[in-house]
Amino acid sequence: MDFSEPSEAVQIKKALDDFIDQEVAPLENEYDQFLGADYEKEIVDDEHRQVPEYRNIVEKIRKKSVEAGFYGMTMPEEVGGGDVDILTRAIVGEHMANRPPGFASAIFGGAGGPTPILLNCDERQREEYLEPLMDGEITTCFALTEPGHGSDAHHMDTRAEKDGDEWVISGQKCYITNGPYADFAMVFARTSGEDGDLGGITCFLVDKDNPDFEVGKIHRAMGMTPGTHSELYFNDCRVGEEQVLGDVDKGFQSAMDWIGGGRINIAAGSVGTAQFLLDMSVEYARERETFDKPIGHRQGISFQLAELATDIEQVRQLYRYAAWKMDEGERARKEESMAKLRGAKLANDAADIAMQVHGGAGFMKDLPIERNYRSARVFRIFEGTDEIMKRTIARELI
């Protein structure tokens, strides 16, 4: 069995390091107020919307990423992507997470960028939505979660009813990443069947300038980039038949397929973040002395680091195995859920251990540990809670 990284992943990582040094790092130096101790106050205005200066940085990096070939690299070549497989993307994601917080997350676009769901676009939709999205000219958002339905998303309250040649969408979504800034939303609504059915859910492409589509409250999320998530309202929102993405009543499976890949990326990112925190802690443990001895020589510290290093390797191999199975076309629902479950725990444990090793210094905003401590907590919730992961694993076993 070959445990080496794919050559493509190695090449992409090197190219990304060069891109960050040349294009991203200068912006981080110039706009350090968006990365400093008071970044949460600097990034958003009084309405909690990201300020134009910050939005311009994100857009600039996105455009440069398109030119460099990183943006949308997981999409097929036929739509302008790099056709990078799931394993390679995950390894690259781990590499990108193994660094202090910065602007690098804008390189791939996140939830606002191209996703495989949009491969269901017909020819007209590709020209209007997918092509400009791949070119970095517009962004999107994935509107699935609702105030009363997260893990049980297929019980959604949002409805879409046919009225002549149009569909009328009524409902509310919440916690939608890039919701305040998306040029169009991928909106999931029940179009037939009973509450809780996996079938009977359809995805619609809704433009931001639709008069019956409204961006609501911008959420204030713990540890995440401020101003990123919002509520979306659809008030008898009318869209044409041509705005249906894929087949009517079959949108939910597309959503779940996309979320599966997202769980792998969370696990990979958790490994990268944990490795960054471990490296910081090891260096600190070598240098910091108490009672005339480096704290790294004390079992109370060294054993914590040994446990964390072991956990990192376990999750690293787990997510890579899950990604490999998916690339091979094999069912990997159990493995992707295991990787996400353990990855989320790893991210939280790493932040806690790093803070404990650093003591009072780790609790201060001078170091990135406290930010990672806050941002890690959401990993146990989004893209499937811990409880849903355990439920999925148990179902696959039994």
Image (cartoon, rainbow, N blue to C red):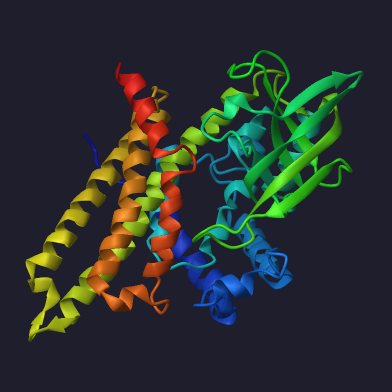
User: Can residue 242 be seen in this snapshot?
Assistant: yes
Measured as percent of width and height from the top left, residue 3 is found at: 24, 41
Quarter of the image for the N terminus: give it. top left
Q: Is residue 260 left or right of residue 80?
A: left
User: In this view, which residue lies farthest toward the top?
Assistant: 193
Q: Is residue 113 visible?
A: no
Look at the picture and state if 122 lies above or below 86. Answer: above
Residue at the image position 26 percent from the left and 51 percent from the top: 312
Q: Left or right: 1 with respect to 214?
A: left
Instruction: Locate residue 87, reporting x and y percent.
Output: 40, 40
Residue under the image location 35 percent in, 73 percent down: 363
On the rendered image, what quadrant is the C terminus found in? Answer: top left
The residue located at (21%, 56%) in the rendering is 308
The quarter of the picture where residue 369 lies is bottom left
Is 267 displayed left or right of 26 in the figure? Answer: left
Observer-nearest of 150 and 206: 150
Image location (x, y in percent) of residue 64:
63, 62
> Toward which corner of the image does residue 27 lie, by quadrant?
bottom right
- Up/down of 207 relative to 288, above or below: above
User: At x 40% / y 71%, what residue is drawn?
Assistant: 368
Toward the front, the furthest residue is 148
